[in-house]
Amino acid sequence: MFITDKIQELNEKSATSHAFHFEHISQLLTRRGIDIQSIIDKIIAFQIAIPSWALGTGGTRFGRFPGGGEPRSLEEKIEDVGLLHQLNRSSGSISLHIPWDIPKDPTALKSHLQAYGLAIDSVNSNTFQDQPDQTLSYKFGSLCHTDAGVRQQAIDHNIACIEHGKALDSRVLTVWLADGSNFPGQQHFRRAWQRTADSLSEIYRALPQDWAMLIEYKPYEPNFYSMVVPDWGTSYTLCASLGTKAQVLVDLGHHLPNTNIEQIVARLMHFGRLGGFHFNGSMYGDDDLTTGSIKPYQFFLIFNELVDAMTDPAVKNPPLAWMIDASHNTKDPLEDLLQSVQNILTTYAKALLVDRATLGDAQQNNDALAAEELLRDIFATDTRALVAEAARQSGGAIDPIGVYRNLKIREKLIEKRGKKNIATGL
Ligand SMILES: [Mn+2]
């Protein structure tokens, strides 16, 4: 579905209101000596990958309530991301999940991507469930398994993911391991770590020179007593044992309540080991809620650390792979993704506005109040008009969700794809 012309028409309707709000923030920033266009250019350049599994309704182990019109194939998933990208101009790539999204014809798929101006982001391996044609089971783990045959099967799968990725010009392999144990004594902690490190080094050997391998951590679930890679420290030790192409991936939802994620981000960037970031929101754990919906202030503090390190020439961290990692039960998945991207961009914009020299002075002088107030002041600044202006300048919608609803896109997708289909892989 191509809707660029309609977006321009509908932007006309939002123009007056947008001009009013943009004028307000422009005056505010000019008074502070901030170059508005340089901020807008940075927002335009910020691209967030959409994972193929976020385009359908997620569900829980208790049930699933599909909303209709979900993509039935990888091609239709690309079309959905193409729609998002036309609306916000910030969703320029799609992340694939193997084996859910194995491309049948990479050349045809690449031209399909090109038609929407999209690229392939990371390829994500899956050793957390058994596939119908699989010989051995991952019930007791994959890369950490006590049986060398199971480990080899999981290694081979990850190498196959790299091959699929190469055919589509991806440069990132993301490894998240469900491996762990449910009962005390079930798993030998040190041996499980070593087997995992040895398996990862086999995969690392197959990684092309210009690729990155991202290692994601998670404190619990699906295993509830121990996870082999539960925290950033363990991810970091694995990456350090592998080499510089291995980087830690931080997923916002993969932390216990009240974890200081902003400090984790700062630490990893200090050591040049933060490779990627998964956006979502969480109340209790890995709840897959809309990014920024529960703890917007913490989300801002995390972005503040990211931007601080990204703009510090002394920090030698590779460019980050940004991706939304969420799959919802309640909202229209496309509306939720639009909302998530808006929340990410408005928060990123705030972090760009922080006066780092003044903050540095307050920190140097141990003026806790001044430092905190500076951050609170920026957090309270409404940056929505900056994000709207960035979208407008790059050909997107001033009001992406408004346009999506006005054009009745979900209704059209249901008409075309049906009410009851389920997106592949979910
Ligand atoms: Mn994730």
Image (cartoon, rainbow, N blue to C red):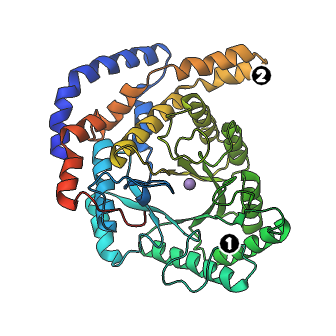
Q: Position of residue 266 (x, y in %)?
A: 69, 41
Question: What label does residue 257 carry, if any?
Answer: none
Residue at image point 30% right, 37% down: 401
- Mark 1: amino acid: Gly
Task: For the C terminus, give its image quadrant.
Answer: bottom left
Q: Are marks 2 and 1 in contact (CB under 8 Å)?
A: no
Give the answer, above or below, for where 379 lies relative to 120. above
Answer with mark 2 or mark 1, whichever residue precedes in sequence.
Answer: 1
Q: Nearer the viewer, residue 25 or 234?
A: 234
Q: Position of residue 98 (x, y in %)?
A: 48, 71
The reply to whether residue 47 is visible in this rendering is yes
Residue 334 left/right relative to 347: left
The reply to whether residue 1 is visible in this rendering is no
Question: What label does residue 364 carry, if any?
Answer: 2
- Mark 2–mark 1 distance (CA, rounded to whole Å): 48 Å
Q: Position of residue 228 (x, y in %)?
A: 74, 63
Q: Position of residue 153 (x, y in %)?
A: 61, 82
Alpha-carbon neighbours of circle 2 within 10 Å: few (<14), some, or many (≥20)?
A: few
Which of the 4 image quarters holds residue 152? bottom right
Q: Nearer the viewer, mark 2 or mark 1?
A: 1
Residue 228 left/right relative to 375: right
| Residue to which mark 1 is pinned | 141
Residue at image point 48% right, 80% down: 132
Residue at image point 82% right, 65% down: 189
Q: Quadrant of ligand 1?
A: bottom right
